Image (tube, grey):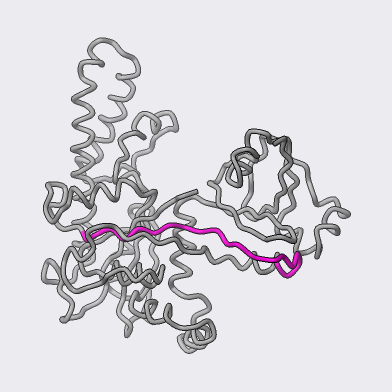
Amino acid sequence: MGLTAGIVGLPNVGKSTLFNAITQAGAESANFPFCTIDPNVGIVNVPDPRLEQLASIIKPNRVVPTTVQFVDIAGLVRGASRGEGLGNQFLSHIREVDAILHVVRCFDDANITHVDGRVDPKSDIETINMELIFADIETIERRISRLERQKKSGDPQALEEYQVLERLHAALSDGTPARSVSLSMDEYQWIKHLNLLTIKDVLYVANVSEDEVSVGANHPYVQQVKQIAEQEGADVVVISAQIEAEISELDEEEKQQFMEELGWKQSGLDRLISATYRLLGLITYFTAGVKEVRAWTVRKGTKAPQAAGVIHSDFERGFIRAKVVGYKDLIASGSMLEAREKGLLRLEGKDYEVQDGDVMEFLANV
């Protein structure tokens, strides 16, 4: 679906190290501000053990996971909304992503420069958030100015948009991000074209040192991040970007051995990728045949024809119906034939809302 998560934060908080670990794309990482100027982009597989379970039943020729795209955006600094540190360019990169991964430095290291001279997660988060808020205020004020004449002429659509923008402007002026303002679907449509920065969902990534990864959520710096996240209704993933970078260079056997030594059932990266997938409001459905077992990405609430369109636009245009069996039902049955004989295979029409884990086959007139 081309959905993307942008990795943001102050310079030298570990964004590019984390990006390299996630994608193994070799993005440049260095100990000076603005190392990343043009955003690096990487596409990664979403870990999903259900794929292997389906493959054990179907025995396909290949297994294809679903993916999420990550964008490594250069470090923002105080004054970015006014153009400081190439801020306008970097803010424009954030506008293009669907969600934000806000990396926060939660480690002390005298060898790694902090732009403010001290490690303070609360202050760091406020710096980034306020720059995004300032940029949104400027965007809204420009739009309100353009709507003034239309509103005075009695244009009802201009009046509705104006009223929504006034609410958002008031919230932003109080330091509240746009995503915290309750908007109806109709109201959201009025301001969608503005592509506001603070309306995007955020996942905070607390980057701790190698020595303190075992402390996790109990780390004093992480506690600061969690407190802010709770106020915003956001989630936090605790990770050591340096450890994940080391793990990413190991083969699968060495990786498993290393994780066992750490007492981990799942790597921090797998947790981060899965959390990002959820943050974007995505679910997975599967197609399963001898040729391939494949995971497909759709947003929650997607109807069957639109889900079919993810595979091919012709399937959406010519949609007739879908054969559906739940993942758990299929695994419990042991085969598609057994699921059908037990009456667990259903026929669903155009109004069916796809559920996470559905195994689907589409019938279409193409």
Q: Is residue 34 magenta?
A: no
Horizontally, is 80 left or right of 196 in the view? left
Left or right of 123 on screen, residue 334 = right
Q: Can you give x and y, in whole percent of width and height, for residue 220 in the image?
A: 28, 74
Q: Which region shows up in magenta?
A: 55-75
Q: Image height check: is 18 above or below 84?
A: below
Q: Compare residues 301 and 55 and report the one nearer the observer.
A: 55
The front one of 222 and 349 is 349
Q: Name the quadrant containing residue 63.
A: bottom right
Look at the image and say whether residue 57 sits in the magenta stretch.
yes
Image location of residue 160, percent across then percent down? 33, 22
Question: Which is more toward the observer, 69 or 227?
Answer: 69
Task: Give the residue drawn at x 18%, y 56%.
Answer: 127
Tell me which residue sits at (64%, 41%) in the image. Answer: 353
Measuring 69% from the left and 68% from the top, which residue is drawn there?
53
Locate the C terminus by quadrant.
top right
Question: Farthest right residue?
Answer: 341
